[in-house]
Image (tube, rainbow, N blue to C red):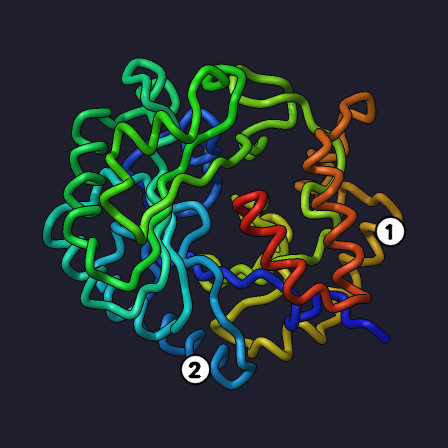
Amino acid sequence: MKPILDLRHAKIAVELTSRCNLRCAMCPMASLQRPLQDMPWELVEKVAADFRTNGLTVSWLHEMGDPLLYPRLREAIDLFPGCSLSTNAVALTPTVSQEILASSLRRIRLCVDTLKPELYQQIRIGARFNQTTANIRRFLEAAKKSPIRVEIQRLITHETHSESVRDFVRFFELDRYPNAEVIEKTCEPLDTVEETSWHQAYYGCFQGYPFRWFIVLANGGVTHCCYDADGQQCIGDMWTQTVQEIVQSDRLRELAAAFRARDWATLPRCGECFRHPAAKSRLYDGLVQVGTRLERFVPLGPLKRWGRRLFNR
């Protein structure tokens, strides 16, 4: 019998901090319903030890907050070999950059989104375009001889269609940096499933299967969905439980039964995504859903890695 949350194929994340220095237009940070806090170091070490026992590799060291704000970032990175960081790059100071480059980090994603200064400040509310791009340029130069993979994110929205990957390559002179590339990412409806200036209306499970993630929040709670910003659908608590206790728990079975029954009172965040039956997923979203379902039964192996690179997920 297949496990409800299969750790062999799950995406694993650890939210080092729920604090962020911006309030981005497509992000629910401005209305987050849980405390803004750093994960206590004792918990970071406990989670890392449990993950090692289970052979788990962390995909991302963030959920809602910006990981560069975590005071023991370098130590945390080294506790989770193979992890990646995604950041708005506002706090990518020379000191932080050197700490990152001295760590074992394999990949960092720098989210600049657009090359239009006015639009950038509408998306990344609270940031300054010139400061962020200067941080990125300085980091590219410092990381030039490093094995770290640097991704510069271009956001695909209604407002950015006139820009291209080549524009980003030219702007940041990426031909000089063989370890850097531009990735394109669709703007996900993290804030609302309604249509906005940044994304279309959405309906359905974006991941294709609701128990796709194992995310440890800064307070120790564990959620199964990267859209569950408030931790409304926690499946366990890493303060008091182990990974195996969580994935084998009655709580997980109850939530799976609630999803099958479309019981949105039990699953309020899932209910939000299923609010508009008239909204249709884009082709890419549909492909993600099909691929996720297949992966529960067929090891996709190299095809999965090829697909990730193609779609920059």
Across and down, in percent, residue 35 comes to 40, 47
The residue located at (65%, 58%) in the rendering is 304
Quickly name the residue at label 2.
Answer: 49
In the image, 83: left or right of 128? right
The residue located at (66%, 41%) in the rendering is 269
Assign the N terminus to one quadrant of the image: bottom right
Across and down, in percent, residue 100 comes to 22, 60
Q: CA distance from mark 1 to mark 2?
A: 34 Å
In the image, 108: left or right of 306? left
Name the residue at the right extreme. 261
Number of marks: 2
In the rendered structure, which amino acid carries the disc numbered 2? Answer: Ala
Q: Quadrant of residue 106?
A: bottom left
Quickly name the residue at label 1.
Answer: 260
The residue located at (37%, 46%) in the rendering is 151
Q: Quadrant of residue 286?
A: top right
Q: Residues within 10 Å of mark 1 (few under 14, many from 20)?
A: few
Name the residue at the front extreme. 175
Give the vertical position of 12 relative to 261 (above or below): below
Give the vertical position of 60 relative to 204 (above or below): below
